[in-house]
Amino acid sequence: MTASVDRASARVAAPTPGERAARARATVVRALEASTDALAAWEAGSAAFGRADEHSDLDVVVLCTAGAGTAVLDAVDEALATVTDGLCSWYVGESLFGVQQFWREPQDADPSLICMLDVSVIELEAQADKWQELLLPERHGRALPIYDPDALLESCRAQSTLDLEAHASRIAEAFATIEQRHAMLAEFPAKELARGRALDAQAMHQALLVKPLVTLLGIRHRPLRFDFDQRYLHDELPDEVARRLVPIACASSDTLAAATVEAREWIDELLATIDLDAIPLAEHAAQMRAAFG
C-alpha cells in the first residue's frame, strides 16, 4: 500500500489547471513505462483539436497486449495513488473505446493536485477497429503521443483511413431513420403538453425533436462528425445556427410549447433541403486532415 500524499505541503500554491493536467499526464506515462503490457498511448479529446481549457479533463488512449486492458488500468491506479490520495474512480469496463476508467479527486480537495482523468485501453490486435477509429483525424483530431517507445503510432496512423463511401451510407441511414420517425412521432411532445405532463413532454422533446434536429444540423454543417450528438456544437456549428438552437434545446417549461413548434418546423426544413448526394465529404475530409493529420 502506497503512503498517502501530504497535502499540507502542497498548499503553498494551488496548482494551475495546466500543472494539474501535466501531473496527471506524467503519472500515467510513469505507469505505462513500468508496464510490460502498455505499447503506446496518446492524448485525445479536446486537446486533439487544440480546445483544451481550464475545465478540460485528460483523455488518454492506450494500446496494449492481448487481454491486458484491466492490468494497465490497475497500473495507472497504483501510480495515481502515489500522487494524491482519496481518489474517486469509476471503472466503466468494456466501452466503445476499449476498457475504460475515470479518476478524479473529491470535489472539495484542497488543493486539487490532478485534473479529472479518463483512460481507455485498447488491445492492439484484437480491437484494431477501435483504435483505427480513434486515430482518424477527420473525426477525432490530432492524436498527441505521450508514450510511444517503439514508434508504433506512426504505423497505426497509416492503417487508419476513413472510408468515405461507408460514412456516406451511415449518413443516409441516419437521415432515413429521422425522416420516418419524424413522420410518426413528431407530435408526441405536443400531446404530452396538451395532457399537462410537462416532464413527459420535455423528455419527448429532447428525444424526438432535439436529438434528430442536432443530427440533421450535423449532416449539414459537420458531416464527418454528424453522429457526435450534442458535443462540440458551439465549436462546430455556425454561430447563428448555434444561437437559434439554444432556446430549442434548452427550453424551459414556459417556452417548451414554442420550442416544439420551432424544432418541428426546422426539422421539416432540413429534411426538405438537405441533398445527401451533394455533401462534399471528400472536401471536408481533406480540410480536417490538413488541419489535424
Image: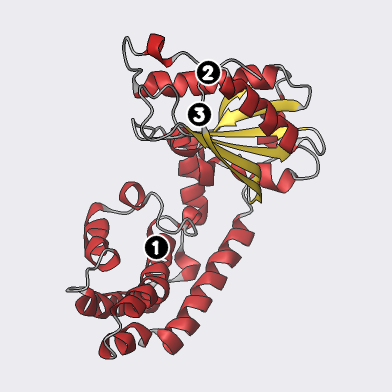
Local packing at callout 2 (Cα closer than 10 Å; few below 14, some 14-19, many 20+) is some
Position of residue 14 in the picture relative to residue 115 (left or right): left
Local packing at callout 1 (Cα closer than 10 Å; few below 14, some 14-19, many 20+) is some
Task: Please state which of residues 203 and 91 is positioned toward the viewer in this rendering.
Answer: 91
Which residue is label 3 attached to? 86
The image shows residue 77, relative to residue 13, as above or below, that is below
Q: What residue type is labelled 1?
A: Arg
Q: Name the spot of residue 264 as percent of width and height, x first.
A: 31, 79
Q: Quadrant of residue 47?
A: top left
* Contact, mark 3 vs mark 1 (Cβ under 8 Å): no
CA gap between label 1 and label 2 equals: 46 Å
Q: Which is in the foreground here, disc 1 or disc 2? A: 2
What residue is shown at x 42% (from left), y 21% (from top)?
Answer: 113
Q: Which mark is residue 83?
A: 2
Position of residue 87 in the picture relative to residue 95 (left or right): left
Q: Which amino acid does label 2 sit on?
A: Val
What residue is shown at x 69% (from left), y 17% (from top)?
Answer: 33
Q: In which quarter of the image is residue 214?
A: bottom left
Q: Name the spot of residue 142 as percent of width and height, x first.
A: 52, 34
Which residue is label 1 attached to? 220
